[in-house]
Amino acid sequence: MNLVGQESFRADEVLSGLKDFKRETAEYAFRRLYLDPEPTSRFLVAGESGLGKTLVARGLITKSVDHLWDSVDRMGVLHICSNQELGGVLAEVQACCQPSQNGLQLPH
């Protein structure tokens, strides 16, 4: 259970649905952000349109939330989208979190 009394979801379920190169990219970014002896504070995934950058981001966000679930009071995700169809990813985040002045908050 997390701080708001809800069971954590499993990142493996989202990651298992990704193609190998997308999953490997999400896992590499996660390792660089959270596990390396000298982690980075930011990570850029770039490429041609349609290669799955949004799915990589979803995998990374899911893995990060799973990792931080029991250790933080709040998590925020900023999703900037130039395509209305891709904006559905933000809607998924907003469906489980409440907007506030300080970002998105987990529901109470």
Image: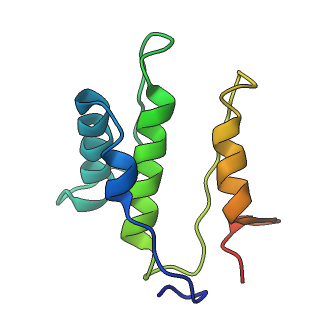
Is 61 rendered above or below residue 46? below
In the image, residue 4 lies at what x, y percent? 61, 86
Toward the viewer: 18 or 42? 18
Q: Residue furthest right?
A: 101
Residue 79 visible in the displayed image: no
Q: How many marks?
A: 0
**Residue located at (50% from left, 85% from top):** 2
Residue 7 visible in the displayed image: yes
Q: Is residue 47 left or right of residue 12?
A: right
Is 85 rendered above or below residue 64? above
In the image, residue 75 lies at what x, y percent? 58, 67
Is 81 rendered above or below residue 102? above
Q: Is residue 92 left or right of residue 37?
A: right
Toward the viewer: 61 or 16? 16
Quadrant where the C terminus sits is bottom right
**Residue located at (45% from left, 55% from top):** 62
Q: Residue furthest left?
A: 37
Q: Is residue 6 left or right of residue 10?
A: right
In the image, residue 94 lies at what x, y percent? 72, 56
**Residue located at (70% from left, 65% from top):** 97
Tell me which colouring the rendered structure shows.
Answer: rainbow
Q: Is residue 36 left or right of residue 76?
A: left
